[in-house]
Amino acid sequence: MNDRQKSFILYSSTNFPLPQGVRLSYGTAGFRADASILQSTVFRVGILAALRSLKTQSVIGLMITASHNKVSDNGVKVADPSGGMLIQDWEPFADAIANAATPINLVQLIDEFVKKENILFDGARSAEVLLGRDTRPSGLFLIEAAKQGVNSIVGALALDMGILTTPQLHWMVRARNKGMKATEDDYYEQLSSSFRCLTDLIPNGHKINEVDDRLVVDGANGVGAEKIQVLMKKLNGLLIEVRNTGKGGVLNEGVGADFVQKEKFYPQEFGPEDVGIRCASLDGDADRLVYFSVPSSDSSTIDLVDGDKILSLFAVFIKEQLAVLNTEGEEKISDDYQARVGVIQTAYANGASTYYLKQLGLEVVFTPTGVKYLHEKAAQYDIGIYFEANGHGTILFSESFLSWLEERCNELSSKNKDSEQHKAALRLLAVSRLINQAVGDALSGLLLVEAILRHMGWSIHKWAELYQDLPSRQIKVRVVDRTAVVTTNAETVVVKPLGIQDAINAQVAKYSHGRCFIRPSGTEDFIRVYAEASTQEEADSLAGSVTKLVDQYLGFYGSR
Ligand SMILES: CC(=O)N[C@H]1[C@@H](OP(=O)(O)O)O[C@H](CO)[C@@H](O)[C@@H]1O
Ligand SMILES: [Mg+2]
């Protein structure tokens, strides 16, 4: 870095002093904190995004959101050139600059990093960062901080894309870097045209009745509520009633996918009068999706259709289409290709879903919690389907599989356009265009669910009955130091503190279908205890006894 560049950063960073006593870390989902202390962090992440763009010679994304957290919080995360999360190698640098005490320290850290990464400032290169934010009021001043951060790198351009869902920004970054159409309108166009393609290919006779046709969406009083209404205008024949649109309600307060999945209770503006209706819930930045229905008018709980069941629905459909494509017969395709399909889950996936998916003959693998791990694993397959139980997930298609599929589709089309094989190939191609290839996306996920339910002729109840969830219980336990817990095997086995895993095993052995694990949360100061068993009482009791073990081994601070 030359002196001019250094003094540029030095000068602009004096406008964004680090608040006293603040220590932040780029966790599972970027930096998150009370919005009032985030300006310096966002400014610095703006610098990081510009450097990442210089390094990769690609467009980078910067999103201001705190997802399902409360409205007074905010956060910032970076989208890499592929549209995925920031490469993990850069996270320590993000941590270091976010916590640099003075502008001079900051410049020093950047200078060292630029040398280490061999980032060239030769004037021939430029950097471009797309900025997006959710509907939080604090997004307005934080986006200004981000712009100044980007602009403090000579030759870097910050493009403010306005209010977007997180997946829309990731989608745009990916599309820009692939030289594809990349505006917000292009996003709606791609989703709506591929949805139409899927519904046009629905086999005759699969009609669902009027009640099952109705879909009501909880927009979490956030950005997804507005965007889904824009999308809906482009779709013929899919009527969506949107509630919790932000007018009158507070973002994520008693609403949204996180609330619905964790509390197993209907969100505000929903209730007994919605018995039997297919309902869906988005989170605050619309990258999570769950479905639910209200079983009866006197019920105090809901029938939750979580990320595991969305995954299962997608897996059933993909498997079915692949089987049709590979059928022996007149239209047998010349160049057979056995697509490697992988299903990726975390330890929080309900055991019944894993059992179901394995019974279907699918390869199921586990990764640690956090979509960056699931996404990375899914990218190793021709078709990688991943979901967290909380509703974040997508389906990734490999480039090589897609180009094979396109060729086969052309071949089949010239032989017999109406063949079942041709239709299956068209459907798989449409899924690859509909479902967001960059990151989990509630809007594209919702359209795929809707298309598949129509294809199958299934109601939400029929879908919910794919398998019966095993009763489970999650408890958050506060301990003296949660980093004292070290896990292995996709977080299912504790290696430290010594002895606790044997004690957990001894408890689990007492229950039929018992399963239990503990891990430190990556986003909150808690140890999470997860337990599953044949009955709710047993799951509660197993979680309770393991909570006691956590208190015993790690120091008691209280749990809830
Ligand atoms: C049990 C659970 O829901 N964990 C969530 C939560 O992570 P923790 O590390 O468990 O705090 O937040 C992550 C980011 O949103 C999400 O990826 C993950 O699924
Ligand atoms: Mg989210």
Image (cartoon, rainbow, N blue to C red):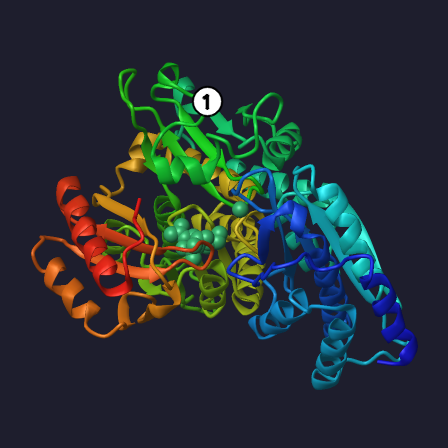
Vertical order, 79 against 182 (above or below)? below
Kindly identify the amino acid type of the residue bearing the numbered disc 1.
Arg
At x 26%, y 69%, the residue is 493
The residue sitting at the left extreme is 510
Q: How many discs appear?
A: 1
Does any atom of ligand 2 lie closer than 8 Å to the CB of label 1?
A: no
Which residue, given by chain and number where applicable, does mark 1 sit on?
Answer: 214
Give left or right: position of 553 versus 343.
Answer: left
From where the camera sits, is residue 466 visible? Answer: yes
Helix, strand or loop at label 1? It is loop
Crowding at label 1, few (<14), some or many (≥20) Cα neighbours within 10 Å?
some
Q: Is residue 358 above or below residue 268?
A: below
Q: Which residue is rendered at x = 89% and y = 72% of the image? A: 7
Q: Is residue 404 left or right of residue 159?
A: left
Foreground pick, 118 / 338 = 118
- Left-right relation of 541 to 295: left
Residue 293 image position (x, y, % from top left): 35, 27
Residue 357, image x and y in percent? 29, 55
Q: Quadrant of residue 137?
A: top right
Q: Nearer the viewer, residue 384 or 405?
A: 384
- Res 119 → quadrant: bottom right
Report x, y in % for residue 405: 53, 61
Query: 548 or 453: nearer the eye?
Result: 548
Taking 25 as reference, is 110 left or right?
right
Residue at x 49% of width, y 62% of height: 375
Q: Is residue 417 visible?
A: no
Q: Nearer the viewer, residue 548 or 492?
A: 548
Q: Which part of the image, by quadrant, shows the N terminus?
A: bottom right
Q: Position of residue 453 (x, y in %)?
A: 41, 36
252 up-or-down from 353: above or below: above
